[in-house]
Image: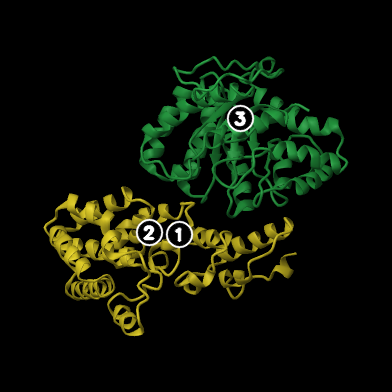
Amino acid sequence: MKIFDPHVHMTSRTTDDYEAMARAGIVALIEPAFWLGQPRTMAGSFIDYFNSLLGWERFRASQFGIRHFCTIGLNPKESNNPKLADEVLALLPRYLNKEGVVAIGEIGFDDQTDAEEKSLVKQLELAGEYDLPVLIHTPHRDKKRGTIRTIEVVKRVGLPEERVLIDHNNEETLPFVLETRCWAGHSLYPNTKMDEQRMAVLVRKFGTSRMIINSAADWGISDPLKVPKAVEVMRANGVADADIQRIVWDNPVAFFGQTGRLDVGDISERPAIDRQQKFENNSVLRGEQITATR
Amino acid sequence: MPPGNRGLILLLATIDLLTSAVCARAGTAAQTWLDAAVSRAAKGDRDALFAAYTNAPKHTGRDLLQLPVSERAALASTAPGTFFDRWTGDDAGRAVLLLTLAEHVGADQFATAAIECYERGDSREQQSWLKALPLLPGSERFLSVAIDACRTNILPQFESIACENPYPERYFPELNFNQLVLKAMFNGISLARIVGLSGRLNSELSRMALDYAAERRAAGRSVPLDLALALTKDAPTEEQLR
């Protein structure tokens, strides 16, 4: 089964992860811009980060037969640093038309402050202006209220709801998202957020329309194989293969492809691996012989 | 800074108590080092201050102070509301450096240097800084640093501001105080460690805590036993909400 993981922070992962993901059927992924676990103190750090999402990380994924796309945005946590936020928001337009950028994200609420709302509104407006879908993070704390407030902001700004993917849903938030025309993302984590068994229950209860799952794997305790693992669990719980395929491929492709930024032809097949390629004279090889043939 | 007569007397007394606490545990070499570092800090030598702030543990050690009752009582009168249970030798040494600087330079000069100690600090330096925050003269001007510190994913760093520390109770606006309590709950930190929680309860916090309990139950997970500490007396019970 062809699998798309539409939310995974590969910058924090190893080449072993890339190999295992490719082996498990992941053909394409999206790496949303987020925070790095440690607050950045200057806008220049964001320039280098965005450049690495568009450059080195994209290249690195290709060396394992995986198509890498990204979303660009200012995350909620760092939106609370006013000077930094203004500077980063001002440089976003430079990045939104770049190849490989398929949406604005991840944006949204963390502490649910006014500064976070200002940054969210500004980026929703940019999404309208640049004809891009948006990936919205929902907070760990006070999640239900944060999700409802997110939906209110989306409605107020007036970006078409079908252009909005609201992520990290759980049993308490999903009904609110499905009442709108927004898409519903679910991050499958080892200990927090959602897990595979609960996800199978949600799919059986709410169906597959506008439903998306991801690993959201990053530098914390997380698992980049959560989407393939969920495929097995859904199957074991009696979800039909066609429905599973819709959740792990058709839906993310339809959502991120809706304004033409995700080239669907481009992802129909796994990219051929050519490890003689180099990125700015750098290679994922560390002096070893080229043995991969796939 | 000057913190006013009474403030200055308490500040000097706190400096003395922390200095003796460090030196009694780390020995005469520590005393010599701290005296020299303090005298350079007193002259406003910023580079010397930053170097000493970083190097403190090499001289003071990193062990918990484990203050006896008499020293706790003395500190409770000079620095009311601050709990020193989890303070280490380097925490105390760093606090002495900052407090000495505050005693000798103007308020703006102090604030600039103090913020630089924090922003260029590694995680342990930042933890020491956050523990000392309620002792600093004019500490309300560091509110945005303290709120930002709560966004860390490094748990000991979060605990340095959220636990055994009277600063959030005194200065955090309701939204940020509530988020701090939720984050403590989320990370399995005992709510009893949040200073002044009972005096800052509010209906919004009760709602957030009960929503959190509902979310945990919907996911088939346990609910923290001390969640009730975050509820006002008139908050509905979980049963009433179901």
User: Looking at the image, how many numbered discs can be counted on the residues?
Assistant: 3
Q: Are marks 3 and 1 on the same chain?
A: no
Residue type, mark 3 in image: Ile
The residue tagged 1 is B156
Say which mark, if any, is on residue B127: 2
Q: Residue at x 49, y 22 (%)?
A: A287
The residue tagged 3 is A30
Identify the chain of the residue marked 1, using the numbered disc in the image.
B
**Considering depth in this image, is B92 or A45 the residue closer to the camera?**
B92
For label 2, the crowd category at 10 Å Cα-Cα, with few meaning under 14, some 14 to 19 and many 20 or more, is many
Label 3, label 1: how far apart the Cα atoms are = 32 Å
Q: Is residue B111 left or right of residue B220?
A: left
Q: Residue at x 47, y 27 (%)?
A: A52
- Colour displayed for chain B in the image of the structure: yellow
Identify the chain of the residue marked 2, using the numbered disc in the image.
B
Label 2, label 3: how far apart the Cα atoms are = 35 Å
Element type at mark 2:
helix
- Asked if labels 1 and 2 touch by Cβ distance under 8 angstroms, the answer is yes
Q: Which chain is green?
A: A
The reply to whether residue A59 is in sight is yes
Label 2, label 1: how far apart the Cα atoms are = 7 Å
* Among the 4 quarters of the image, the one containing residue A68: top right
Q: Is residue A111 left or right of residue B99?
A: right
**Considering depth in this image, is A133 or B81 the residue closer to the camera?**
B81
Rendered view: B85 above or below A2:
below
Residue type, mark 1 in image: Pro
For the C terminus of chain A, which image quadrant? top right
Residue A161 in picture, x, y percent from top left: 66, 33
For label 1, the crowd category at 10 Å Cα-Cα, with few meaning under 14, some 14 to 19 and many 20 or more, is some
Q: Residue at x 37, y 75 (%)?
A: B66
Identify the chain of the residue marked 3, using the numbered disc in the image.
A
